[in-house]
Amino acid sequence: MTTDRLRLGMFVMPVHDPDKPLAQCFDEDLELAVKCEELGFDDFWVGEHHSSTYENIAMPEIFLARVLGETSRIRIGPAPVCLQYHHPAHVASRLAFLDHLSHGRLNVCFGPGAIPTDMEMFGVDPKEAGRRVVEAINMILEMWTSTPPYEIDGDFWSIRLTDNLDPDMGLSGIHHPLQTPHPPIFTPCITRDSVGLRKAAARGFSPISHHMIGTDVLKNHWDTYAAGCREGGLEPDPANWCVSRNIYVADTTEEALARARVNSMGRCIEYIIELTRRGDALDLWKRSPDQPDDELTLDYFLDEVIIAGDPDEVTRQLRALRSDIGDFGSLVLVAHDFDDKADWLHSLDLFANEVLPALESN
């Protein structure tokens, strides 16, 4: 099956210069959202982190509500809502509210958080994060698709709404989302043979593959997703697969590679490498389980994962990616700090005005 027009997304992790004023970071992320709508992007995703000076948007839903006021078409989505930190009833209520506020422009990505200080602060055992996420999703979907009374028991939360219902006074439970039965649901995926991805696929959720994994792991994501769909009685559709990549376009390939090595993209990759090294999690980025840790350098990512070059070279690499891993429906670019705003905006213009038309003409 061949997908229709390639959808475009932008993912703001965010990773910012910790010395930059927070208000400036947020203003520049907002400027990026407006620019993405102008250039025809379909989706704008924002991550959630609570205790990092680098990744500094604590409540993506609040930021995205601000984006709504500056845009009219682009779809918005928290990516992910870190479910282990929040009561499911609160998540269900606030996202239903945002769906109405956006007039149905809301996407939702559910997943765990990964910042160790966040988990410590919220008192979450990392070993329980997966079960917390699944339990929260089940409760949220039940509240979105049914009416009280609620008596929902879990291992981590319980939801009761039975004794004080008074429909005559409007006391009748949370609002349901505008989109029926609920907004499109996505799930992040990083690892090979992910049980979570397979189970999510069986429920009709769409995968978003991580931006730092190589093509072999991406192919495994598709295989795992397709198997999960079939287990759930669904036909796997590449149009539902989102693949995120770090992309930098300049006037010449030499310039693009030189800048990607030292600009905020290169620094972001090095930051994530070091963060996962300290957390004994470098295996996340390996092309194969036997790849040595010391190969996971910026040079490796520039050679095998990052897409950088002039418009012709970026087009060639994206065509090669689709040839290697098969068709997918959405390409999600990763946003980086505006260390040089003019260069980053020029990269986006080149991508939208030269790379994308060349891809679509193929």
Image: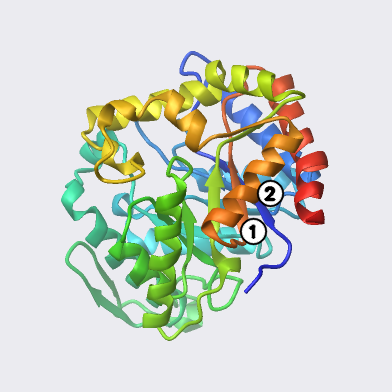
Q: Which quadrant would residue 310 be assigned to in this image?
A: top right
* SS at circle 2: helix
Q: Is residue 178 visible from the viewing direction of this image?
A: yes
Residue 95 sits above or below residue 251 on the image:
below
Q: Of circles 1 and 2, which is in front?
A: 2
Q: Is residue 169 left or right of residue 344?
A: left
Are there few (<14), some (14-19), or many (20+) residues within 10 Å of tag 1?
some
- Residue pictured at 42% horizontal, 71% vertical: 201
* SS at circle 1: helix
Which quadrant: the N terminus? bottom right
Q: Which quadrant would residue 259 be assigned to in this image?
A: top right
Residue 297 in picture, x, y percent from top left: 38, 25
Q: How many marks?
A: 2
- Nearest the viewer among 175 and 237 is 237
Report which residue position mark 1 lands on: 101
Q: Earlier in the sequence, mark 1 or mark 2?
A: 2
Q: Amino acid at mark 1?
A: Leu
Q: Amino acid at mark 2?
A: Leu
Residue 349 in picture, x, y percent from top left: 78, 34
Residue 282 sits above or below residue 325 on the image:
above
In contact (CB < 8 Å): disc 1 and disc 2: yes
Q: Is residue 180 left or right of residue 201?
A: right
Chosen colour scheme = rainbow
- Residue pictured at 50% horizontal, 19% vertical: 17
- Residue pictured at 61% horizontal, 71% vertical: 178
Report which residue position mark 2 lands on: 68
Residue 250 in picture, x, y percent from top left: 72, 25
Q: Is residue 140 visible from the viewing direction of this image?
A: no
Q: Which quadrant would residue 355 be assigned to in this image?
A: top right
